Image (tube, grey):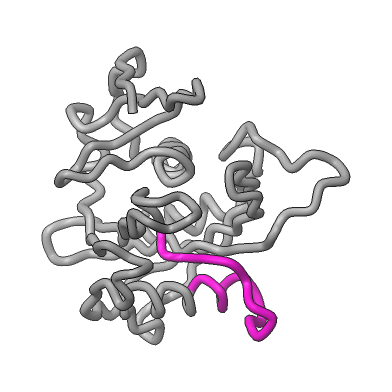
Amino acid sequence: MTYAAELMSVCSRVSASELSLRHLPAGRVARPAAVLLLFGSDGEGLTVLLLQRAADLRSHPGQVAFPGGSCDDADSDAVATALREAAEETGLDPTGVDVLGELPSLWVPPSNFTVTPVLGWWRALSAVHPVDPAETASVHVVHVRDLLDPANRGSVRHPSGFVGPAFWVGGLVIWGFTAGLLSRLFVLAGWEIPWDTTMVKDL
């Protein structure tokens, strides 16, 4: 089975509870958003597209994230939001992306977004870069093998007490929603390599 087929299989069978333990409380309204989990191959292996948010943003400043953002009224659906935001943030050419499916929408308490992760396959690679430095500090095409390497994995402890999975790759610290979703996706796709789940670093 190809990587793309394995990702499509995850979309067809995963539930929200398999991706996150946090659920929107009854009666609470959250803002809809979408992110693009864009996988591809650069000839040297499987990759995923990530960006680092600008350090002075009000929401999740300086964090490594998937391209994405809040839904606009003009967006027809979550896929349209994810592709639009990715183009606006990284210069990605959406015509080179094959949409594989959507994962269940997940609640992100710090920003009160309900985020729909859209899985894509980068069929025709295009140049990417920070389009607006005020929003995006840097853009990275990261090899999945480096994320899966047990030497680059562990957990982080936020000053709030939150403890969650993390990756240290290429000078980036990937944690929070992004790391949690990648970690669960690797398990569900059958890609995970055993790593030291007892190792915790303060963020």
Q: Is residue 140 left or right of residue 187?
A: left
Q: Nearer the viewer, residue 108 or 191?
A: 108
Q: Does the magenta portion include 76?
A: yes
Image coordinates of residue 5 in percent, x first then y, are 43, 59
Image coordinates of residue 137 in percent, x first then y, are 27, 62
Q: Quadrant of the N terminus?
A: bottom left
The residue stretch that appears in magenta: 66-82
Farthest residue, direction right:
27
Q: Quadrant of the C terminus?
A: top left
Which residue is painted at 58% across and 43% down in the image? Answer: 110
Up the image or down, 89 lies above or below 30; here it is: below
Which residue is painted at 36% across and 25% down in the image? Answer: 155
Up the image or down, 164 lies above or below 56; here it is: above
Number of numbered discs overlaid on the protein picture: 0
Which residue is painted at 24% across and 62% down in the image? Answer: 138
Q: Does the magenta portion include 93?
A: no
Image coordinates of residue 163 in percent, x first then y, are 46, 23
- Name the image quarter holding residue 182: top left
**Residue 33 appears anywhere in the view:** yes
Q: Nearer the viewer, residue 82 or 134?
A: 134
Q: Nearer the viewer, residue 91 or 189?
A: 91
Image coordinates of residue 177 in percent, x first then y, are 48, 43
- Name the image quarter holding residue 141: bottom left
Up the image or down, 111 lies above or below 68; here it is: above
Which residue is painted at 36% across and 48% down in the image? Answer: 63
